[in-house]
Image: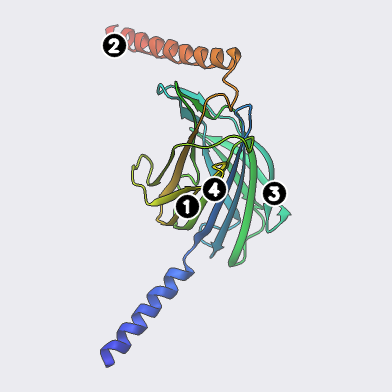
Amino acid sequence: MQLKKIFFVLFSIFVNQLHAQERILNFDVKVKIEKSGTIEVVENITIKAEGNVFKHGLLRTFPLTRKDKDGNDIDVKYSINSIEKDGATEDYFTKEEEDYWKIYIGDAAVELEDGTYKYQISYSVPFQIGYFDNYDELYWNVTGNGWDFPIDKATCQFYLPSENNKFENLHCYTGSEGSSASNCTSSLNESKTIVTFSAHQLRSNEGLTVAASFPKGIIDPPTYVQKSNSFYKRIKTYFWSVVFGIGMFLFFLF
């Protein structure tokens, strides 16, 4: 009997510590796909702050490049529409660091009190559609994979530009970057116009990545200028790689 009491006390302490840990309680994302290929994203992130990592606010990190279907790097540009904390406009600034674009949300002179806060980040990202031979697709890393604490729940919904359009194949992945684990669910509404992805209990540095395909013709194909910019970027990268290689060869030769 005494052993049971000891076990109960220890278990209660463990549960209380787990509950008190800084974490993301809910990471809910809505993604509206525009006919132009731009996506309009609204993230609602509810956090539990304890004054450790969440000292002044929230740091959101995004990659500056993505891969196309041929493995080429495509530049990613983000445009912020609004940022709020608990329904009110919040201070922020952005900064490019290495291969990432970061949003620092909050006032550096004001520390958060311990508690729960809800942040809403609204932004636009052009040229995010993958164009394949028989279908088009949106592939999106919902949460990112760099959080140093758990995410209790992550959800994401995709919307096509017209109710007459329908989603087809759905995929979702969980875990660290590059993981093929699929501890998540995906579902369509009755008309197949909205897809919902969901994952629970993501650990530190784990995230949710999702993909949904749809028939060609719904989203405008890339323009000649867009294709040209991508081509010239690859040529520029190859050029400087060759120049660097020749330079290193001459350096060691002489």
Q: How many marks?
A: 4
Alpha carbon distance from label 2 to label 4:
63 Å
Which callout, 3 or 2, points to the residue nearer the camera?
Answer: 3
Q: Between residue 25 and residue 101, name the one nearer to us.
A: 25
First in sequence: mark 3 or mark 2? 3
Which callout, 2 or 1, points to the residue nearer the camera?
Answer: 1
Which callout, 1 or 3, points to the residue nearer the camera?
Answer: 1
Q: Position of residue 1 (x, y in %)?
A: 27, 93
- Identify the residue position indicated by label 3 in the image: 91
Q: Which mark is residue 252?
A: 2
Alpha carbon distance from label 1 to label 4:
14 Å
First in sequence: mark 1 or mark 4? 4
- Identify the residue position indicated by label 1 in the image: 198
**Amino acid at pointer 2:** Phe
Looking at the rendering, which quadrant does residue 118 occupy? bottom right
Confirm or deny contact between disc 2 and disc 1 (CB under 8 A): no
Alpha carbon distance from label 3 to label 2:
51 Å
Looking at the rendering, which quadrant does residue 96 occupy? top right
| Residue at 57% in and 41% down | 193
First in sequence: mark 2 or mark 4? 4
**Amino acid at pointer 3:** Asp
Q: Position of residue 46 (x, y in %)?
A: 57, 58
Which element type, helix, strand or loop, lies under badge 3? loop
**Amino acid at pointer 1:** Ser
- Identify the residue position indicated by label 4 in the image: 189
> Label 2 neighbourhood size at 10 Å, few (<14), some (14-19), many (20+)?
few
Is residue 13 left or right of 24 when viewed as pictured?
Answer: left
Alpha carbon distance from label 1 to label 3:
30 Å
Confirm or deny contact between disc 1 and disc 3 (CB under 8 A): no
Compared to 247, does 67 lie above or below?
below
Give the colour scheme shown: rainbow
